[in-house]
Amino acid sequence: MTRILITNAMLVNDFKVFNADVLIREGRIDIIDGDLRSRTSDVVIDAQGKALLPGLIDDQVHFREPGLTHKGDIGSESRAAVAGGITSFMEMPNTQPTTTDPDALEEKLAIASRTAYANYAFYLGATNTNIDAVKSLDPHKTCGVKVFMGASTGDMLVDDPKTLEEIFAASPILVATHCEDTPMILANETRFREQFGNDIPIRHHADIRSREACLKSSSLAVDLAKRHGTRLHVLHLTTADEMALFSTAPADSKSITAEVCAHHLFFNSSDYDIHGTRIKCNPAIKLEADRQALLQAIQDGRIDVIATDHAPHTLEEKQRSYFQSPSGLPLVQDALPALLEHYHRGDLTLPLIVEKTSHAVARLFNLRDRGYIREGYWADLVLVNLDQPRTVKKETVLARCGWSPFEGYRFQSTVDLTIVNGQVVYHNGLVADPPRGLPLEFNR
């Protein structure tokens, strides 16, 4: 494999920021030192003081394959991901068919082995009827069990109390939850239909997918986990109210951890008037006070992971009326620049961003040799020009859906180069073939 020498980089790693050179050999980080210019290499990359970060590990994406590939597939969406500095992803089970048995899991792994530009793992989805598949899971085959405790695709809503108890009691690995209370949401839909009919203004999305619905479901998940000693990871939290459920203790000491997504840190409910159904997502984007509370929770340790929940739909689908427009945003290509806006504003430090997008994900999911810039680890890296503005344009969107909720926004930072498993996969706007992703391995 190509030996790559990166010189004059500003490394952000292990809560330190320092200047160093990095030598990559046989796919892994061989040496980190102050001056490696005399070392033999095939390719030299002069970082010129740009920030070198561990590649992001996105613990929540929807890449739509199999069954929904007009929106995206593992190949197309992982190409967009590496362009955004994401070098590993964990993909959700609400495809068609759903990933709710070992055979479906193996099918996705086989597809990714041929087409994934980033490293990959897949969740097994829980249902009201597949508890045997959950109990018999091989912990080395999957990143976790996904439980939709809110409305979802097909039969993936788990709303049977007995089944929930069994999943939380018997899952051999991490349980990741989508928490919204469906009966409360349905009652809210009825109330707003009485006022507006089916043409409900998008500004009421957060009233329908309400904070009360989020809190009730998140509280249930935390209660179940405490009673059964479950390793629980609560996904895409959106409200200030829910933050009281989570501890400020170090992430490694907690059995219950929490995630927030980049768009919930960037947008607030006033943006519905600007972006309309383009930013319709579940759980819903809420108040500015909630956005500020989420940023504070990252700083105080209640939030352990930042992800994307990348969920592409075609623009034609998104432009339909409220009930017909699907929820979800394409985010992998722009999530890191969006997070770096918080660095420029003074909301988050670079080491804290790296901790929440790489280090903590690797530790909480027990990933082997990923998530850090360390000698012996896989060389999954992203080089960022912190002072190179970039305006998001539709023409440069790599996700198959062809649009971004950030179109027209001028980010202050640009992803310059991405390395996956020791090979340059993205540079200056171009993704390199062939796909080089590997299955994520777990120390379990």
Image (tube, helix red, strand yellow):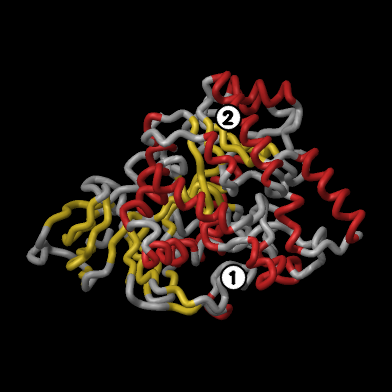
Which quadrant of the figure contains the N terminus?
Answer: bottom left
On residue 222, which mark appears? 2
Q: Where is mark 1, residue-wise?
A: 404
The three-letter amino acid code for the residue at tag 1 is Ser
Question: What residue is shown at x 73% (from left), y 66% (from top)?
Answer: 318
How far apart, in angstroms, are the residues tagged by discs 2 and 1?
34 Å
182 shown above or below 21: above
Residue 351 place in picture, x, y as percent: 31, 53
Q: Residues within 10 Å of mark 2 (few under 14, many from 20)?
A: some
- Helix, strand or loop under label 1: loop
Residue 370 place in picture, x, y as percent: 35, 46
The three-letter amino acid code for the residue at tag 2 is Val
- Which residue reaches farthest left? 38
- Which residue reaches farthest front? 289
Residue 158 place in picture, x, y as percent: 72, 33
| Closest to the observer, 284 or 386 | 284
